[in-house]
Image (cartoon, grey):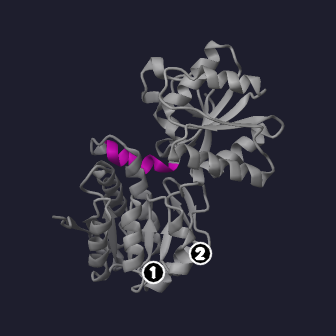
Amino acid sequence: MHYIFKVCFTIILGAILSTKIAHAKNARIGLSLPLSGTVKKLGEQFLIGARIAIQHHTHDTIELEVLDDGCKKDLGELVATEFSTSNIDIVTGFLCNEPSYAAANILRDSKTPILIAGAQSERLTKDREREEWNIWRLSPGDNAAAIAAAKELSKLWINSPFSIVDDGTVHGRTLVDAFRLQMADIGLSPHFTDTFRPTQSTQARLVRRLKKAGIRKVFIGGGAEDIAMIARNASDLKIKLDIAGSEVLSVLPFLPNKQRAPKGVTAILRNDAQLLISSKVLSDALIAKDIIPEDFMYRGYAAMQVAIEAIGESKQDTISSLNAKTFKTINGNVKFSNNGENTISPYALFTWNGDVFVKNGSIQ
């Protein structure tokens, strides 16, 4: 039997101060997070960041209503229904797609703004106008990594033949198809395409096919272990390959040494929030509380910054604010397009140095 886990968290640190400040807010923010199920840890991390953001915002009185969506459709529907009767000014969180769709439909008539901070389905913004959803997506879409990869790699590969290969899985094929379309829009087409079988003991045949085709640059849609193996095989065979992949490579530093890739593999990854100067305010707060910093804590803090800044005297004022403003967060600036997408990409090109990924252009 499903249940709603509900926590009301009211910050009154600024109550006295707010009486002295014109236009001080007295706001209620809803937070829909998976606090049960397989991804509950991410929800808990997000909540830590969100709560600290409110604690740091002492000019207003903010009440936070936290509900558990379990990353599931049916529980998400219960959560959205609860929010629809709670006089909430804005709702955020939504790390998973299904609760996001549930909230979009159920909160449509109430005009409650929904700030999606984790779900990445392209349909959330693609169908926004037609469905009259009050959605703004802070998180990047499913195709954002491929778009960023094409933007960055097209600069480096413009005068060189390149290949696109994938492992035949849904994820791998979807990634390379999006990358191919973006490169085509730029005016670049692959000289060679191929598919390989994942989780094999070697990928030497693929490496030899790439050499035979005269290819030295390749974008791979596959798992981190397979991409690392392709890079190792190329190195062992003394075949020069410039290999690029996507976010799956973020696990490379955590693989056993013998499974890691040699230096030089590039990847489109999200900027590390912990390395940004603007994130120091949260890093210091976490350290003071003896909490190990995690990525979703920074996402929770940033989402709350946008939500608090956006809230106006009415829901329509909040909607106007989300449409017009550029928001400053610890993860960087946020600006929404006409269809509710965050126009400022969190992605950048990184190069593997054998131990960690280093952002291109930074001092190693």
Label 1 sits on a secondary structure element that is loop
Please, is residue 281 above or below residue 355 in the view? below
Which quarter of the rendered picture does the N terminus lie within?
Answer: bottom left
Residue at image position (81%, 40%) is: 158
Q: Earlier in the sequence, mark 2 or mark 1?
A: 1
Amino acid type, callout 1:
Gly
- The label on residue 255 is none
- According to the picture, the residue beneath numbered tag 2 turns out to be 324
Left of 85 or right of it: where is 293?
A: right
Residue at image position (39%, 57%) is: 300
Residue 114 location (% of width, % of height): 43, 72
The local crowd at label 2, few if under 14, some if 14 to 19, many if 20 or more residues have their Cα within 10 Å, is: some
Q: Main secondary structure of the magenta part?
A: helix
The reply to whether the magenta stretch includes residue 331 is no
The reply to whether the magenta stretch includes residue 279 is yes
The local crowd at label 1, few if under 14, some if 14 to 19, many if 20 or more residues have their Cα within 10 Å, is: many
- According to the picture, the residue beneath numbered tag 1 turns out to be 312
Left of 154 or right of it: where is 297?
A: left
Residue numbers of the magenta segment = 278-287
Determine the residue located farthest toward the left in the rendered image.
1
Please, is residue 101 above or below residue 167 in the view? below
Can residue 63 be spotted in the picture? Answer: no
Q: How far is the residue under mark 2 from the one under mark 1?
A: 13 Å
Residue 12 location (% of width, % of height): 27, 70
Amino acid type, callout 2:
Ala
Residue 273 location (% of width, % of height): 48, 46
Which of the two residues, 136 or 187, is positioned nearer the viewer here? 187
Left of 336 or right of it: where is 134?
A: left
